[in-house]
Image (spheres, rainbow, N blue to C red):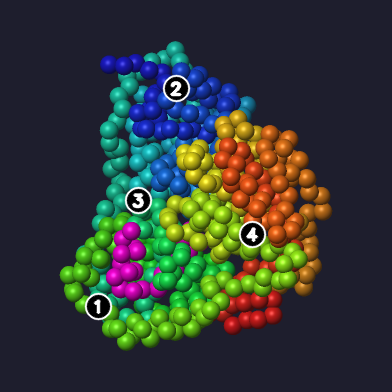
Amino acid sequence: MELLSGAEMVVRFLRDEGVKYIYGYPGGAVLHIYDALFKEKSIEHILVRHEQAATHMADGYARATGKAGVVLVTSGPGATNAITGIATAFMDSIPMVVISGQVPSNMVGTDAFQETDMIGISRPIVKHSFMIKHPSEIPDVMKKAFHLAESGRPGPVVIDIPKDMTNPAEKFEYVYPKKAKLRSYSPAVRGHSGQIRKAAELLLAAKRPIIYAGGGVVMGNASAQLTELAKMLNLPVTNTLMGLGCYPGSDRQFVGMLGMHGSYTANLAMHHSDVILAVGARFDDRVINGAAKFCPNAKIIHIDIDPASISKTIKADIPIVGPVDSVLTEMVAIVKEIGQVPNAETVASWWKQIDEWRGNRGLFPYDKGDGSIIKPQAAIEMLCEVTKGEAYVASDVGQHQMFACQYYRFNKPNRWLNSGGLGTMGFGLPAAMGVKLNFPDADVACVTGEGSIQMNIQELSTCLQYDLPVKIINLNNGALGMVRQWQDMVYNSRYSHSYMESLPDFVKLAEAYGHVGMRITDLKDLKPKMEEAFAMKDRLVFLDIAVDTSEHVYPMQIKDGAMRDMWLSKTERT
């Protein structure tokens, strides 16, 4: 029998659970845990410069690996600084375990120094939360937390630990629990076979079918099954913002991202489809535009691990609750068993229409200009070319995010990391850091803007301390680009507080943090400078790229319209 303090139990459990990294920031309420961590050499702790960055690092790690990221913060402001990152993970269904310190249990509720009700504050943005009431329950609670975070529809879990629960003078029996015991939690492990058969038969009979795949395919490790089904039935595939990479972006059957800034082809194909196979997607408002006009002639098959997501926004004709990997595996087997193939003439007619929409322009055509100024789209295309489409790309939020998802071709899952649901500026750099730490030999880029990068720019210091040579692609247009675009389109170009009239010299700033900075203002320098940056394998390089200040992101859906209703340029609409 081994006797450990509560603090030692926390650290020992993390080791026994196979945790490699903890992202955190110490403070009074967690110092017993930090002291125990000092003696544990198998876990690497990353000292961030702000707790929000700790959650985004854990989030980036989780998106790239599928495993729960682990965060350790102190009570009060340490815990509240983590809230934005917890909400980001919750909105995108990302597994995370956040351990927050709390004031001693006999002081809870007294407004003690650095006390906040972390359980209450985080309740709407976590999958579940726990407060430790006795040190002996720490191993079981932590096992439950990891199981909840990683199973079913993933999400963040908070464990709030009062300081007296980690007292090093009090020892209790420690046994690593091999299984989590949860009476009322049993996510589906397979879909309903009858429903899956109905879905397969409906797909085989469809005249204009399409696959609409989301982030659940990525987090559910179902890319191979989705690709096999699409190839077998010769189906067009569109991805949500979160689903990019779950189907090869350079494949002929990929018709682009759909939704608010989705491709003309994808949005039209969705609108005119007669059967939609929605897999691991939740019919988000940024996808469907106006719910009343959404795909009026389509029958909808909806596969999701979370029953609450099905028919929440758009009614499903064939709902299937279950893990997307097992459901798609069974669907492929049923299609093979039926032995029927879609009608060749019908398939050819549908693809002829899709190819007409796609035309010779590609998925996202844009005016390349006369070359006197760098277009943001060109910068992303160059990034894709220089990295051969193999990089992990984290983005912040805004125009640069949309350009990144439109013009970088993601052929593998888990390579695209962005805050889709919450839209969190400041996400990109720490998320890229979380990926680079775990995949040190991979190319990792953070696509950002001069507004977003300043939200967590202090993490350049963390990058130097832990040797995280990510490449920062700053599309600098001197403004909050997406805000300015809306002000152009909706507010008669009244630019209310969207221009940043005072910006740092990002090259000098990068150098001040010990990194390499490059400023690019001429299109002819874009490729050589970017190649030079990625050739520096052991240095963080900040590429500050001056881009067209007037460029908009297109297509852009027209509010409350159907999926086919889009602006295609500043003067052209469908």
How far apart are labels 1 and 3 at the CA level?
Answer: 33 Å
Which residue is label 4 attached to? 379
Q: Earlier in the sequence, mark 2 or mark 1?
A: 2
Q: Earlier in the sequence, mark 1 or mark 3?
A: 3
Q: Vertically, is 179 above or below 306?
A: above
Amino acid of disc 4: Ala
Instruction: Please indicate, yes or no, whether residue 290 appears anywhere in the rendered image.
Output: no
Q: Nearer the viewer, residue 488 or 473?
A: 473
| Element type where label 4 sits in the image | helix
Judged by depth in the image, the label closer to the viewer, 4 or 3, is 4
Q: Position of residue 282 (x, y in %)?
A: 44, 63
Judged by depth in the image, the label closer to the viewer, 1 or 3, is 1
Which residue is label 3 attached to? 152
Q: Position of residue 399 (x, y in %)?
A: 64, 61
Q: Earlier in the sequence, mark 1 or mark 4?
A: 1
How far apart are labels 1 and 4 at the CA level?
Answer: 43 Å
Crowd tier of the residue under label 4, counting other residues whose Cα lies within 10 Å: few below 14, some 14–19, many 20 or above: many
